[in-house]
Image: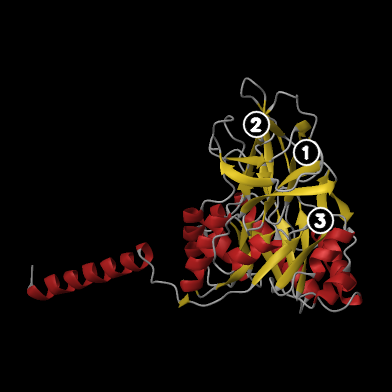
Amino acid sequence: MARSSRLFLAGLLVAAALLAGFFLWPPPVPRAAGPMPHEAYVWQRAWTSGVREAVAGARPTLDGLVALGAEVAWEAGKPRIVRVRVAHEALRASGLPAGIALRIGSFSGPFRAAGDPVEALADLAAALVREAAAGGGSPRELQLDFDCAESRLDGYRVWIEAIRRALAPVPVTFTALPSWLDGSAFRRLAAASDGFILQVHSFERPAGPDADLSLCDPAAARRAAERAARAGVPFRVALPTYGYRVAFDRSGRFLGLSAEGPRPGWPEDAIVREVAADPAAMADLVRGWTADRPEAMRGVLWYRLPVESDALNWRWVTLKAVREGRTPRPALRAEARRPQPGLVEIDLVNGGDGDATLGGWTVAARWAARLVASDALDGFARVAEGPGWMRWGWADRSSPGRIRAGERRPVAWARLEGDPDGVAALVESAGGR
């Protein structure tokens, strides 16, 4: 082979290698650092006084809100719409930028640019924007939350293009799953929008009561954010604050899960576990992204807004700590109160910014008087006693037992002879005295 031919062939091989390297190892995405905006979803269907109070107090912990405006389910290809009566005046009074979310149930197609069902969705979206504007200003975005199969992303793009045309100039964004990110259909979908929200939290049905329960894998969330940045479109990351109760029967069979609200009609002997967003892991994510993140990542959206009546959601102090990149920590103390002569009430108080489980602690009280009567309260039971002292521990097997940040829980009461002074209460590690 002539020398010139060999040089030409070598050049082709080098060019092919460089081209392959470009596709196999794409160039690094631009980076950013520093504090990010933090927003939260207002996903409640009823705007109770508690929800309104939470919205009013969201600033300065949060930089924005996204309120659920409507939900769409499908019956024989026709939309069934449930509207939420959003208190737009409360959103306006909060002083925070607010968006509106439209939740859309699973739909298999066909996806058309005109006619039903896209015109029904566009009309609904436009009505939500008009209502928000009438209540105090145009929303910062209309966010679509569609249960879309990965194989239907090109069809979803047709919907987004049509809704975006109908709502201009209001931005239209959408929620995306990590499993969507690597396909060309997702890149086309992202390019047709004004941005997306990468949802890295979910809950999968556990194999049994001993299975590991988690809502968000921090390592997977970091990887997903890096992959999302390659779409070249601004995005935010949705992280969890919520929790579930998960129930199994005595044989380990899954019975169901519940979020906020009354306990379902599970058997009395059901095995109940809690799965909750991990504040320490989420704080670590925030610290990492504050120090270094893709430039296209524009903030965090928390699911969901803390409301005082929530039993499984974070408290405000916990969210504030996580937003600042601090790991929330509980601070337990026991208090002895004397509401009337001779009566002592023992409370457990969490003065920290993180929740604590109750199984690892006991509460003890000491007194210098004759005990007349006593009883444990609210899931606690007497575990030990002696002259002038008593100890209580968590005993409710139907519930894992948790004391939330800022919460006060009654432990026990004791009736003592006379009205003695000097009753002392303290928190001890389980098994200690």
**Residue to which mark 3 is pinned:** 44
Give the distance between the C-alpha atoms of the residues marked 3 and 1, in whole angstroms: 37 Å
Secondary structure of the residue carrying numbered label 2: loop
Work out whether 63 lies above or below 302: below
Give residue 168's position: percent from left, percent from top: 77, 77
Quadrant location of the C terminus in the rendered image = top right
Q: Earlier in the sequence, mark 2 or mark 1?
A: 2
Q: Is residue 212 left or right of residue 139?
A: left
Front position in the image: 369 or 264: 369
Front label number (2 vs 1): 2
**Residue to which mark 2 is pinned:** 387
Give the distance between the C-alpha atoms of the residues marked 3 and 2, in whole angstroms: 51 Å
- Any part of residue 27 in sight: yes
- Any part of residue 109 in sight: no
Q: Is residue 350 left or right of residue 17?
A: right
Q: Is residue 300 left or right of residue 43?
A: left
Q: Residue furthest top?
A: 251
The colour scheme of the drawn protein is secondary structure
**Residue to which mark 1 is pinned:** 413
Give the distance between the C-alpha atoms of the residues marked 2 and 1, in whole angstroms: 16 Å
Front label number (3 vs 1): 1
> Residue, x 11% and y 76% (percent of image)?
4
Q: Residues within 10 Å of mark 3 (few under 14, many from 20)?
A: some
Q: Residues within 10 Å of mark 1 (few under 14, many from 20)?
A: some
Secondary structure of the residue carrying numbered label 3: loop
What amino acid type is highlighted by mark number 2? Pro
